[in-house]
């Protein structure tokens, strides 16, 4: 169908169920529906358009027809909540590597999960879990990449951008999945952190975040630790460890 060669993807990843859609509400939502109906993965769902694409913190992900890659991987695991938490950063690194290999472009990663190019967000990632007693039994890994999207809604025009290229989509998906499956099979492996830190657009920058009381706190992002947490040095010299959430970069004016 359309831009994707399902047979080539199945050949590249034996045992992978590949499901293509012209349009869908959300590939993540559909993956959960299909899991509940008995599809336990591994599976890949790709749509040429999403009418209700979802992002982190309840946000939407703009997904117009034919201009981006909108896909979800349903991946069975048997792991702890702590190990599953690494899946978001590992997915960001997998997309970073796949884009680099196929297009030659090196995107930046904004902690935790967004990829940036030319100062604008080009990719969002939403990782959800299927829970079992005391752990996680499946990961629902959503990836949205703006390839050639130009006509963004007004509220996104200053923030969202595109890769600006139209690579072979099957090749790009294959490259991303090659890295992603390797990472998801080894959630405790920390070698991904080298690329995660190198691609960071947050380290060394002034960032702001909300504390437990809802107050905005500013500091300098100093380090990404072995658990993928962000260490921020506050103005009083103390450190705050952020395990998840939203960090915004504040660019100082010259």
Image (spheres, rainbow, N blue to C red):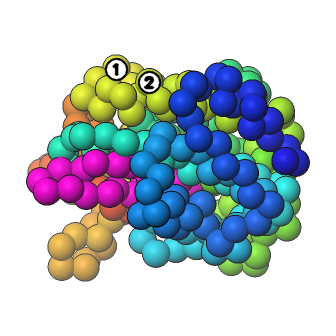
Mark 1 surroundings: few (<14), some (14-19) or many (≥20) residues within 10 A: few
Q: Secondary structure at mark 2?
A: helix
- Dominant SS of magenta comes to strand
Q: Residue at x 85, y 67 (%)?
A: 151
Q: Residue at x 70, y 45 (%)?
A: 118
Residue 198 visible, this orientation: no
Query: Position of 228 compared to 142: left or right?
Result: left
Mark 2 surroundings: few (<14), some (14-19) or many (≥20) residues within 10 A: few
Q: Which mark is residue 124?
A: none
Q: Which mark is residue 191?
A: 1
> Label 2 near label 1: C-beta < 8 Å?
no
Q: Residue at x 78, y 47 (%)?
A: 147
Query: Position of 127 compared to 114: left or right?
Result: left
Residue 180 visible, this orientation: yes
Q: In the image, is residue 202 above or below residue 211?
A: above
Q: Residue at x 47, y 52 (%)?
A: 39
Residue 54 placed where, x, y %?
A: 55, 68
Which label sits in the foreground, 1 or 2? 2
Q: In the image, is residue 146 above or below residue 216?
A: above
Q: Disc count in the image? A: 2
Answer with the quarter of the image where residue 154 lies: bottom right
Region of the chain picked out in magenta, as a range: 124-142
Q: In the image, is residue 107 above or below residue 236?
A: above
Query: Position of 49 compared to 145: left or right?
Result: right
Single out the residue that lies furthest toward the front: 38
Q: In the image, is residue 96 above or below residue 40?
A: above
Residue 90 placed where, x, y %?
A: 41, 36
Residue situated in front as seen by the camera: 132 or 3: 132
Answer with the quarter of the image where residue 121 lies: bottom right
Query: Position of 166 compared to 87: left or right?
Result: right
Q: Which mark is residue 182?
A: 2
Residue situated in front as seen by the camera: 131 or 207: 131
């Amino acid at each position: 169908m359309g831009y994707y060669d399902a047979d080539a993807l199945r050949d590249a990843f034996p045992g992978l169920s590949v499901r293509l859609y012209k349009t869908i509400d959300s590939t993540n939502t559909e993956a959960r529906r299909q899991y509940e109906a008995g599809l336990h993965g591994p599976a890949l769902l790709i749509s040429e358009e999403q009418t209700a694409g979802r992002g982190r913190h309840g946000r939407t992900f703009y997904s117009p027809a034919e201009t981006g890659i909108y896909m979800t991987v349903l991946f069975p695991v048997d792991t702890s909540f702590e190990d599953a938490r690494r899946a978001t950063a590992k997915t960001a690194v997998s997309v970073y590597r796949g884009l680099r290999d196929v297009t030659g472009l090196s995107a930046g990663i904004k902690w935790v999960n967004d990829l940036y190019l030319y100062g604008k967000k080009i990719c969002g990632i939403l990782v959800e879990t299927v829970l079992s007693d005391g752990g996680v039994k499946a990961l629902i890994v959503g990836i949205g990449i703006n390839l050639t999207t130009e006509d963004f809604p007004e509220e996104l025009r200053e923030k969202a951008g595109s890769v600006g290229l139209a690579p072979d989509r099957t090749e790009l998906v294959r490259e991303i999945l090659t890295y992603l499956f390797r990472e998801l099979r080894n959630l405790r492996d920390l070698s991904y952190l080298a690329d995660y830190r190198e691609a960071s657009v947050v380290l060394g920058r002034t960032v702001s975040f909300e504390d437990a009381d809802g107050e905005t706190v500013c500091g300098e992002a100093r380090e990404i630790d072995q658990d993928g947490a962000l260490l921020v040095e506050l103005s009083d010299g103390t450190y705050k460890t952020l395990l998840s959430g939203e960090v915004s970069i504040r660019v100082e004016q010259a």
